[in-house]
Amino acid sequence: MTGEYHFRTASDLGREQTELLQEMLDEPTHRLVEPAARPGARCLEIGAGSGSIARWLAERGASVVAVDLDTEHLTGLPGVTVLQHDINDGVPPGGPFDLIHARAVLMHLQRREHVLRELAGALAPGGMLALGEVALHNPPRVLAAPEPGDVEVFLRVLGQAKEAFSGANGMSFDWGFEVDGHLAAGLADVRSRLFSEPLVGGSTQGRYVHNLAVQLSPGLLARGAAEADLDRFCSLFLDPGFRCWYLQFVFSSGVRN
């Protein structure tokens, strides 16, 4: 993931980012992986962040390998082997695995299809590959904004961010919708579901997107975005008067025969 992932969990903002993601998505992630979360199961958690899913699996008796580029926050995890590892470099030792899970990881990788095939190949017979990805409403729909010019600012900065950090730069907000087809090409019992709710300024989703916007702001400034636009863009996600359809979360899984 080196050179591709635009957010780092080792920073204070990165720690907050992972905590907010956990708050939003741990419950649906539990439902996704629960069929494979059994005592003695060999599990690989990719992009483990602060370790909430690795901990949950270990508490159910699974043997867990948790990997991330930054492992500073992966502490106090009984039953979990922590590895600093770039999944672009291949699947870490410990397999074959009964469960491999990654959340908001492959969408950042240029070689995401290759990595998915490698992960599927590292499953034991009957093992599950479970992926959670972040997608965007296209186009996002603003439902309410505090000031008349806010919609224009929001859409302008969002367009600049997508141009700067997606496409040739690796990140894909369409990948979540493509995962199901890639899983079906090599695995059985493929299932996918979509979760979305309006972003309200100051909510968990609002604070999560604010966090990402703050992390991306220096790169956008360097690419010519207006500082006033960026400041207003970031502030909208903390303002309860701002509501929009923005993020979607896609959960997919498949099983190796």
Image: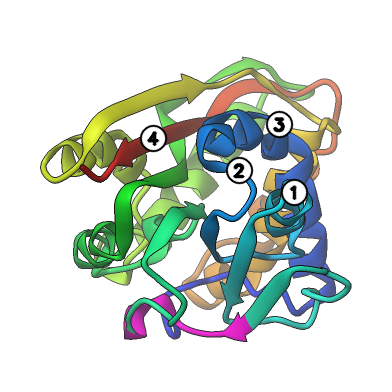
Q: In the picture, residue 52 is in which quadrant?
A: bottom right
Residue at screen point 32% across, 66% down:
170
* Residue 150 sits in quarter: top right
Q: Amino acid at mark 3?
A: Glu
Q: Residue at the spot x=50%, y=45% of the render?
A: 158
User: Local crowd at mark 2 within 10 Å, few (<14), some, or many (≥20)?
Assistant: some
Q: Position of residue 204 (x, y in %)?
A: 80, 35
Q: Which residue is mark 2?
A: 38
Distance of label 3 from label 4 (alpha carbons): 15 Å
Please give the name of the residue rendered at 37% of the width and 26% of the height, measured from the top-left corner: 192
Compare residues 23 and 188 and report the one nearer the observer.
188
For residue 237, side relative to residue 191 (left or right): right
Q: Which residues are magenta?
A: 83-89
- Give the labeled residue for mark 1: 56
Q: Which mark is residue 252?
A: 4
For the residues carrying marks 3 and 2, which lies nearer the camera in this image? 2
Q: Are marks 1 and 2 in contact (CB under 8 Å)?
A: no
Single out the mark in the foreground, 4 or 1: 1
What amino acid is found at the position of numbered circle 4 in the picture? Ser
Marks 3/2: CA distance? 17 Å
Q: Earlier in the sequence, mark 3 or mark 2?
A: 3
Q: Amino acid at mark 2?
A: Arg
Q: Is residue 176 magenta?
A: no
The alpha-carbon separation of the residues under discs 4 and 2 comes to 19 Å
Residue furthest top in the image: 143
Give coordinates of residue 166: x percent, y percent.
35, 59
